[in-house]
């Protein structure tokens, strides 16, 4: 775990950063917090949070014992994701990419034709693993309490489509889970947590993503983590958008940010994907 103070976040120079290189490292830090709650910076806060999550699930989306079983995967969420529109077909066709044309093709799309776009498509086999570019996908899981798991599943769905499409084009993709909040800790305006879910060279793990993009990851594990390692405010702040922070850095020009409020329904997820502009072959329309 990397814990840094005085980090520039959203242009403010005294932010607090937690960064984990993988999910296993993150859960080791959370487990340490639960094993030694009296060592927390906010005395008794970790025990108080665990007791609360054992009594209720409306705030976090599941009971504490259920969250423990879903640390690295959630089969119920995975089954739902795979049945959502487009994912099953997309995964089976992973070795092909779609090429649109006005003149020839194996299939046609009426919606594209009505929108005066090239509507005939050919399936072109992807040859080799060309390293044409490197993209980072940031998924901000900091959402208000009223956003339930069914809403947040569309973030997973959007990330699946984006990652699959980019890698079919020969790009490499890294996926980072993040949560950016304001007024979590006294003395720090912003608190940012980052967890690497997929490195550029690693395969895509939908089972892992189906549990990481969830209310309980934000409202159980992150709250316990923050309360143990830093003195925390009673309400643990409120979620904010992360796009301004990541867009400030030149190195993140190729970043795709699924932010707070993004992709919380099928319509919003589809609209988000349609706004992406990453080269002439990247076309979700």
Image (spheres, helix red, strand yellow):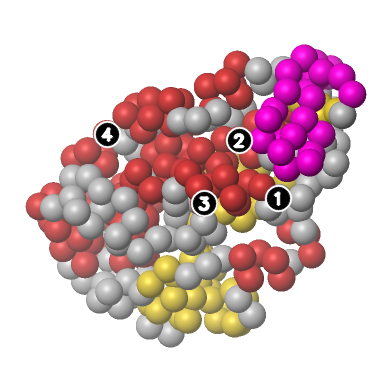
Question: What separation in Å lies between label 2 and label 4 (alpha carbons)?
Answer: 26 Å
Element type where label 4 sits in the image: helix
How many angstroms separate mark 3 from mark 4 (CA)? 30 Å
Residue with the mark numbered 3 = 268
The answer to if 225 sits in the magenta stretch is no
Crowd rating for badge 3 (residues with CA inside 10 Å; few <14, some 14–19, many 20+): some
**Mark nearer the N terminus (2 vs 4):** 4
Q: Nearer the viewer, residue 233 or 113?
A: 113
Whether residue 225 appears in this view of the structure is no
The relative height of residue 196 versus residue 165 in the rendered view (above or below) is below
**Within-10-Å neighbours for mark 1: few <14, some 14–19, many 20+:** few
Numbered disc in front, either 2 or 3: 3
Residue labelled with disc 4 = 69
Kindly identify which numbered label has been placed on residue 276.
1
Tag count in the figure? 4
Q: Nearer the viewer, residue 47 or 10?
A: 10
Residue 89, image x, y percentages: 57, 20
Q: Which residues are magenta?
A: 103-128
- Indicate which label's residue lies in the foreground, 3 or 4: 3
In the image, residue 87 above or below residue 271:
above
Name the residue tied to disc 2.
161
Mark 2 neighbour class, 10 Å CA radius: few under 14, some 14 to 19, many 20 or more: some
Query: Is residue 190 visible from the viewing direction of this image?
Result: yes
Residue 232 relative to residue 138: left or right: left
Marks 2 and 4 in Cβ contact (< 8 Å): no
Q: Residue at x 43, y 60 (%)?
A: 142
């Amino acid at each position: 775990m990397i814990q840094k103070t005085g980090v520039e976040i959203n242009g403010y120079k005294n932010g607090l950063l937690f960064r984990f290189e993988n999910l296993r490292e993150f859960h080791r830090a959370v487990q340490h917090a639960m094993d030694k709650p009296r060592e927390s910076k906010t005395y008794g806060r970790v025990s108080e949070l665990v007791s609360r999550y054992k009594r209720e699930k409306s705030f976090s989306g599941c009971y504490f014992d259920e969250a423990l079983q879903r640390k690295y995967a959630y089969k119920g969420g995975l089954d739902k994701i795979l049945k959502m529109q487009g994912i099953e077909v997309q995964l089976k066709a992973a070795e092909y990419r779609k090429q649109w044309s006005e003149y020839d093709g194996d299939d046609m799309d009426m919606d594209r034709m009505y929108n005066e776009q090239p509507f005939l498509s050919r399936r072109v086999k992807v040859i080799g693993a060309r390293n044409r570019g490197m993209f980072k996908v940031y998924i901000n899981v900091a959402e208000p309490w009223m956003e339930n798991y069914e809403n947040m599943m569309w973030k997973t769905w959007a990330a699946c489509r984006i990652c699959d499409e980019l890698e079919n084009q020969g790009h490499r993709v890294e996926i980072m889970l993040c949560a950016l909040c304001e007024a979590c800790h006294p003395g720090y305006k912003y608190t940012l947590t980052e967890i690497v879910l997929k490195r550029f060279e690693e395969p895509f793990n939908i089972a892992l993503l189906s549990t990481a993009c969830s209310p309980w990851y934000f409202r159980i594990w992150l709250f316990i983590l923050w309360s143990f390692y830093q003195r925390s405010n009673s309400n643990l702040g409120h979620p904010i958008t992360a796009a301004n922070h990541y867009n400030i850095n030149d190195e993140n020009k190729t970043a795709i940010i699924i932010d707070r409020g993004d992709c919380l329904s099928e319509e919003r997820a589809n609209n988000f994907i349609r706004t992406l502009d990453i080269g002439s072959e990247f076309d979700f329309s």
